[in-house]
Amino acid sequence: MADRFPSPFEIQTPEGAEGWQELYTYSSLFCEERREYEEGAFWFHDGVHWPEALTPWDTTFLEFALASLSQYNTRHYIIPPAYGVDFRILNGYVYLSPVPAPPEDIESRVPLFMERAGFYFGNWNRLYDDWLVKIRELVKEMSELRLEPLPQIEDLEVITSGVGKGSGNDLLASYHRLLDLALTLWQYHFEFLNLGYAAYLDFFGFCKAAFPSISDLAIAKMVAGVDVDLFRPDDELKKLARLAVSSGIDDRFDAGDVATTWQKLGSDEAGRAWIAEWEKAAEPWFNFSTGSGFYHSDKIWIENVEVPVGYIADYITKIRDGVDLDRPIAALHAERDRIVAEYRDLLDSDEDREAFDAKLGLSRTVFPYVENHNFYVEHWAHSVLWRKMRDVGKVLKAAGFIVNTDDVFMFKRAELSDVLWDLYAGWAVGAPSRGPGYWPAEIERRRGIHEALKQWPAPPALGIPPEVVTEPFTVMLWGITSDSVSAWLSSGEGGADGELIGFAASPGLVEGPARVIFSADQISEIEDGEILVAPLTAPSWAPIFGKIKATVTDVGGMMSHAAIVCREYGLPAVTGTAFGTKNIRTGQLIRVDGNTGKVTVLE
């Protein structure tokens, strides 16, 4: 067993990826100028949000997200023990390192945090209502941005209106405004999220101190059964499936392709009424990514209609068979209330019970945001941003700068400003721009580098492992624990034969055949009664939960989206196994114990 992970400075460039550093912002790379700090830290691969090698422009959301997360810890709410989360890109993959606050500063940070966090906790509902208004207005403004090809001649109205500026100015300003809105979006994202986790962690810490033998899962169950907007897309699918059956048009979804289905639906009033309901649901709820929302290549429901229509067809089949599609809310509430009552009765004093009630109440108040933000930011807003970026790609393709629209994501975000300037300047002067002769070959070179990076097996961690992992956010969201670090160091060896240990993320004990998949494109392979084994799951995978018996993931902790969604759907889950997709093969019979966090290969 190794005693440390490789130094980031020992990692070799994959064959065919020479020069990969040029694809990313200089400040995001490991470098000699910071070598002493970087070699002395522990860095883990963030497979929860960025499991694959990033294209240059897609790193925008990595940088905006991590800087925004960090500033709220360090500069806004003054989280006593924690600064931000540092980030680096190595061979295209994302590595993170939580930065603790200096021990000598923690005590002085406490009163600042209490005042600032206390204001938000005391005004949570009002501030959250305001947040919903802000986020919708921001998405609306992004949607209305116009990024269009430059005209051969400006319209006469540009002259007669006295506006005093032209299309080139508007194109550049719109791209810069898109970036400004994207950063503001991520500022909004963390306005509440860190405090939401802080409230839950405060309740978590109280329970661990008051009930030393309590499991993490028991604490999570106490805040289960919440009604959050993240489940709304799936609820809309179920509603549309029920409408199809009740309207007698459900047989039209047996066509096998969307075009034929839509043609049949448009043939009479009942079908057209269904399409009207679809359109109501689609905007905004089907702005839902099949992945984490951080990759431009992830499919969006509203743009890839075959994905949600396929789910609707599956739901129609279940409705015909009399299956109850509703989430088990009543059962979740009953189990939640039972656990709360039993543990509350164990407390010795009225003071302790009052503190328990207050901390639990605050956790339940703030918890919906912990999931809701994911739809509004990573899914809805990002869907709009990807579309706007493709508008930029269409402009550059029409001008001969790139060959394919999606080539636009092979530019770095700041570099793209220079590219658009080159386009504008050539258009303004009436002379050739450099771009058409330069960028197509360069984009092809970069694409080859990116393809080589995608084949590289990113190590789970770099640097010096901590003696013990205690930072709760790292444990609960990313699933990084002392045990997982030890497993990585030993390359997964040393455990019981045929056994994996992860987080007991959602209760239940089941056995069934495994279905190992690595992306949303493989979802159609899943059959009824199988157990899903994947690197991670996305919230938009919820419609398959009616098919599968349990979920096993390589990454993610107790508060990862996979864990929360599985609990809300009553599906047993073990997350953060590290080696699930490596050690389990499709078709093997496995046992998943969501009560203990153990996965056993039975065949």
Image (cartoon, rainbow, N blue to C red):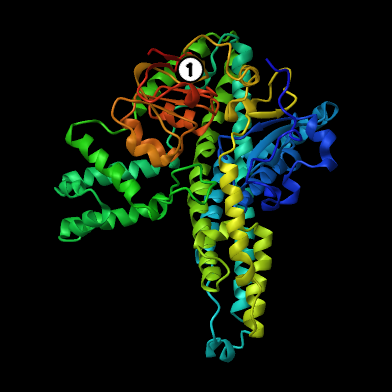
* Left or right of 81 on screen, residue 478: left
x and y percentages locating residue 278 in the rendered image: 30, 53
x and y percentages locating residue 220 in the rendered image: 51, 23
Q: Which residue is mark 1?
A: 340
Under circle 1, the secondary element is helix
Tell me which residue sits at (57%, 8%) in the image.
213
Tell me which residue sits at (31%, 42%) in the image.
311
User: Does residue 598 sit above or below 575 in this rendering?
Assistant: above
Query: 47 and 53: which one is in front?
Result: 53
Query: 274 and 594: which one is in front?
Result: 594
Does residue 161 appear in this view? yes
Dot 1, crowdedness within 10 Å: few (<14), some or many (≥20)? some
Amino acid under disc 1: Val
Residue 427: image quadrant is bottom right
How many badges with numbers are in the image? 1
User: Does residue 46 sit above or below 407 in this rendering?
Assistant: above
Tell me which residue sits at (23%, 30%) in the image.
323
Does residue 53 appear in this view? no
Query: 14 and 515: which one is in front?
Result: 14
x and y percentages locating residue 29 in the rendered image: 73, 44
Q: Quadrant of the C terminus?
A: top left
Q: Quadrant of the N terminus?
A: top right
* Left or right of 281 on screen, residue 176: right
x and y percentages locating residue 232 in the rendered image: 39, 43
* Left or right of 594 on screen, residue 102: right
User: Does residue 575 sit above or below 414 in this rendering?
Assistant: above
Tell me which residue sits at (26%, 39%) in the image.
314
